[in-house]
Image: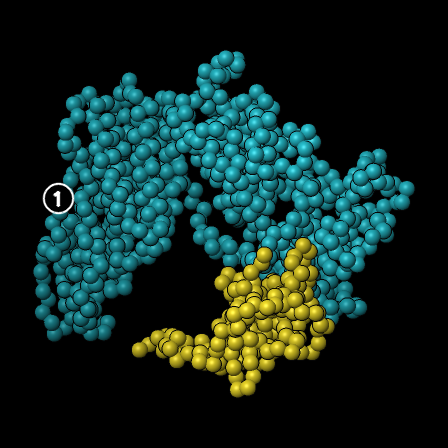
């Protein structure tokens, strides 16, 4: 078996990549996003505003010569704004044809959450932010809200 | 052909073929009414080249069709028969051209060109027979290029190297005859020698200069002989040579063997070359010198380069411009005494600017090919709609960026179709209105500042403003009372998606697609389309497209701490307003008088809803902008300076914002948004 196949196997059967989530904080909650989408994590930096955009689209940043759009997760979730501080980070994601930055309060760690530790959220959608959560994962005693990136990026 | 760079040969082949087809169509359309000797020669030459090249690439269906047309024109050229149905002749040639185009498209998409051209060839040779005055034979035994031998897909047997070079060299002599009619014998011989170089040394061959086309008849008559030394054994060399395409006869002799081995002089007709029926024909020999003569006229100091390389070059150029700005405007240099540094950076900038102009000019392509292609469309439509239209082309030498050309061919085609289908009246209608029976469509290109204008003008019936307005209302496209629309505004509705005034759907237009392709395609390249029509007299479409996309000269301005870049070609001047020159009309539109003229003021911060900008007009700076038609004054906080910027598109995720065309990186790494001046005018 070639090296390539091995890697492929790891990804899909062994599940080491599949079950990995990058966890981050918004307000008091911990969220997780599949590591497969994540390119890198950068510190918050100067953002150029773009007029006429939905409020959660913060603007454009210069990522080593590439201009990418950044979204504010707090605003997207309808949470009150918070001043950027030492801990504020931008998670750079690639989703389909888009490369985008996601501003979060703080980035924690990569957590391995196997499938059996993941359950669907309660069926009643009570709040606006709730619709961006696809699943709920458990790591020890803690709960991570696993983000639905596709919904999160939907603009309408 | 082994794998002698077949990919790049294919690419070259497709490129050449498309050019030839364009030439062919141009010649046919010029000669539509009656072919003169020049056009006959041209078509003959083109067809001959197509036949030769495609036979060499083993696309026999293309070669077959080209061959039959070549035969036809050979006869026309030699016998100059009279009373020919030129329309029918053109139809035959054009359907041949279409066939070739279709096959080329297949090749381009990586499919194998499997179209069957035999029916077409038969029709064409039937036509030739008719001209010759002979009865058409049922099974026209038109000689067709024989099927190629199986290409050298099965790899030759593993080399049995008999030893290292030097003492273990075999000496060989080979003689090859190519199949008759396979064309380009000299190139085939060259390819052969090229392939041999990997196996053999000390290659000498006769004729010696195979690049020269004069050697073709020699190779045809005497074959191609070569002597060489190789460390490989007889069988290996023989099987290698036997894989040559279009091989008729191969004789390989071993002149001397390395020590310890017995020379095996086996003069042997290559038995493993599949014996093929070889068709002798008279045409190619006479044709060869025509071809040679034509090729000599080709400019020798031109090379063709893959566009992707130019794209890379352009991208690098962009990086260089940014990088130069980053170095020379580096904040660490602030406050330093830098006389000699500044001198050197000026020199650097000068070089970069020249370099950039050169790179840009390499990408500039004249519009002629795109324009001349329209002749064919006009002709086809006239035949089908029974209209008589003359297409006049002006300014086809105007050059635009290669990337832009790709996006404007479709718009031009749609507009011309639209003009002929909707604009130009039927022949009877033209008679009753006293117009000349032959309608005219003008296709013109000209430079206007940083833009190219493409004008398509017909002398048809013009746009029915009432009908357009009705349709627009029915489709819910109007936003104010009918009476408030000017004719011009109404005419622009036709560019909206799904709009068509033609009640009947024809083969060419009426489905409401087409005109919105015009606007959407133009939008991609930052162009605009305008229509201007006089009822009964005709319609003029004006497409305005930028010369180039990538790097523009911009003026950076400041609004509420953020930077914006305005393309300098649109700026007339900037100035400070005096309070006494400002006034406001009852509906709140701000205006200013400047040197006796009155202009509207657009506040950039209001336009984009930006907080924190300077709101007192006299405190900020006004920039007078011109879109080629109107002038407005734009209020910004302050000017920063002029700079070349590399246009980058907005992140894909962002929806399009009116008034913004992209963004750019400034020297210090900041981002500036590029203003689309057109956005301020079409409010």
Position in image of residue B528 (x %, y %): 60, 40
Q: Colour of chain A?
A: yellow
Quarter-wise, where is residue B251 in the image? bottom left
Q: Is residue B349 visible to us here?
A: no
Which hue belongs to chain B? cyan
Furthest residue in direction front, as rendered: A124
Q: Position of residue B436 (x, y in %)?
A: 50, 16
- Quadrant location of residue B668? bottom right
Q: Quadrant of the C terminus of chain B?
A: top right
Q: Position of residue B228 (x, y in %)?
A: 22, 61
The colour style of the image is: by chain
Q: What residue is shown at x 33% (from left), y 42% (from top)?
A: B102
Name the residue carrying label 1.
B277
Q: Is residue B371 above or below residue B523?
A: above
For the N terminus of chain B, the quadrant is: bottom left
Q: Position of residue A48 (x, y in %)?
A: 68, 62
Q: Is residue B640 left or right of residue B23?
A: right
């Amino acid at each position: 078996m070639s090296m390539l196949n091995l890697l492929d196997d790891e990804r899909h059967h062994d599940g080491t990549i599949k079950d990995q989530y990058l966890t981050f904080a918004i307000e008091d909650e911990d969220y997780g996003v599949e590591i497969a989408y994540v390119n890198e994590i950068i510190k918050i930096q100067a953002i150029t505003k773009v007029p006429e955009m939905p409020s959660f689209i913060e603007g454009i940043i210069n990522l080593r010569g590439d201009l990418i759009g950044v979204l504010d997760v707090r605003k997207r979730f309808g949470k009150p704004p918070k001043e950027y501080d030492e801990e504020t980070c931008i998670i750079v994601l690639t989703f389909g044809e888009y490369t985008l930055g996601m501003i979060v309060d703080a980035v924690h760690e990569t957590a391995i959450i196997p499938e059996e530790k993941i359950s669907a959220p309660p069926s009643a959608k009570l709040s606006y932010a709730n619709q961006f959560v696809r699943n709920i994962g458990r790591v020890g005693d803690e709960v991570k809200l696993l983000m639905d990136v596709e919904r999160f990026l939907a603009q309408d | 052909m082994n794998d002698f760079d077949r990919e790049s040969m294919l690419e070259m082949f497709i490129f050449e073929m498309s050019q030839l087809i364009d030439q062919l169509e141009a010649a046919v359309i010029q000669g539509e009414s009656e072919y003169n000797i020049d056009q006959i020669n041209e078509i003959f030459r083109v067809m001959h080249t197509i036949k030769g090249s495609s036979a060499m690439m083993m696309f026999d269906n293309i070669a077959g069709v080209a061959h039959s047309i070549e035969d036809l024109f050979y006869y026309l050229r030699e016998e100059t028969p009279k009373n020919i149905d030129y329309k029918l002749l053109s139809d035959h040639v054009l359907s041949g051209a279409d066939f070739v185009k279709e096959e080329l498209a297949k090749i381009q998409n990586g499919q194998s060109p499997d179209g069957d051209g035999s029916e077409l060839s038969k029709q064409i040779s039937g036509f030739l027979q008719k001209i010759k005055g002979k009865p058409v034979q049922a099974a026209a035994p038109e000689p067709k290029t024989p099927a190629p031998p199986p290409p050298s897909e099965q790899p030759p047997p593993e080399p049995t190297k008999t030893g290292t070079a030097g003492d273990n060299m075999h000496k060989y002599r080979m003689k090859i005859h190519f199949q008759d009619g396979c064309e380009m014998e000299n190139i085939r011989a060259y390819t052969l020698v090229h392939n041999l170089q990997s196996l053999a040394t000390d290659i000498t061959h006769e004729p010696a200069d195979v690049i020269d086309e004069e050697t073709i008849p020699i190779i045809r008559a005497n074959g191609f002989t070569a002597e060489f030394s190789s460390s490989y054994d007889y069988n290996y060399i023989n099987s290698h040579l036997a894989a040559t395409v279009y091989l008729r006869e191969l004789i390989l002799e071993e002149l001397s063997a390395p020590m310890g081995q017995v020379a095996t002089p086996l003069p042997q007709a290559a038995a493993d070359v599949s014996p093929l029926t070889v068709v002798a024909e008279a045409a190619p020999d006479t044709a060869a010198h025509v071809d040679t003569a034509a090729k000599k006229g080709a400019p020798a100091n031109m090379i063709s380069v893959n566009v992707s390389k130019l794209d890379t070059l352009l991208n690098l150029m962009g990086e260089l411009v940014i990088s130069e700005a980053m170095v020379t405007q580096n904040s660490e240099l602030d406050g330093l005494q830098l006389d000699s540094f500044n001198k050197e950076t000026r020199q650097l900038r000068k070089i970069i600017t020249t370099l950039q102009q050169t790179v840009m000019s390499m990408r500039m392509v004249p519009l002629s090919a795109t324009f001349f292609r329209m002749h064919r469309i006009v002709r086809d439509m006239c035949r089908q709609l029974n209209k008589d239209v003359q297409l006049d082309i002006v300014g086809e030498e105007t050059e635009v960026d290669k990337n832009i050309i790709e996006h404007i061919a479709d718009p031009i085609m749609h507009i011309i179709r639209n003009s002929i289908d909707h604009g130009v009246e039927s022949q009877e209608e033209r008679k009753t209105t006293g117009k000349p029976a032959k309608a005219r469509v003008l296709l013109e290109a000209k430079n206007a500042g940083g833009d190219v204008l493409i004008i398509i003008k017909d002398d048809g019936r013009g746009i029915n403003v009432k009908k357009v307005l009705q349709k627009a209302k029915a489709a819910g496209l109007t936003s104010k009372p009918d009476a408030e629309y000017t004719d011009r505004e109404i005419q622009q509705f036709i560019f909206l998606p799904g709009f068509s005034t033609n009640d009947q759907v024809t083969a060419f237009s009426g489905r409401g697609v087409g005109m919105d392709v015009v606007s959407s395609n133009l939008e991609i390249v930052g162009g605009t389309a305008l229509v201007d029509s006089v009822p009964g007299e005709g319609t003029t479409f004006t497409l305005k497209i930028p010369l180039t996309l990538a790097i523009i000269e911009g003026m950076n301005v400041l609004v509420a701490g953020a930077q914006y870049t305005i393309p300098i070609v649109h700026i007339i001047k900037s100035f400070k307003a005096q309070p006494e020159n400002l006034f406001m009309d009852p509906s709140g539109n701000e205006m200013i008088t400047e040197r006796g003229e009155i202009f509207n003021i657009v506040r950039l911060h209001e336009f984009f809803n930006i907080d924190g900008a300077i709101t007192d007009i006299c405190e900020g700076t006004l920039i007078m902008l011109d879109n080629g038609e109107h002038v407005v004054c734009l209020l910004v906080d302050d000017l920063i300076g002029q700079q070349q910027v590399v246009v980058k598109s907005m992140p894909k995720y962002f929806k399009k914002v009116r008034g913004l065309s992209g963004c750019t990186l400034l020297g210090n790494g900041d981002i500036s948004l590029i203003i689309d001046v057109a956005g301020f005018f079409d409010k």
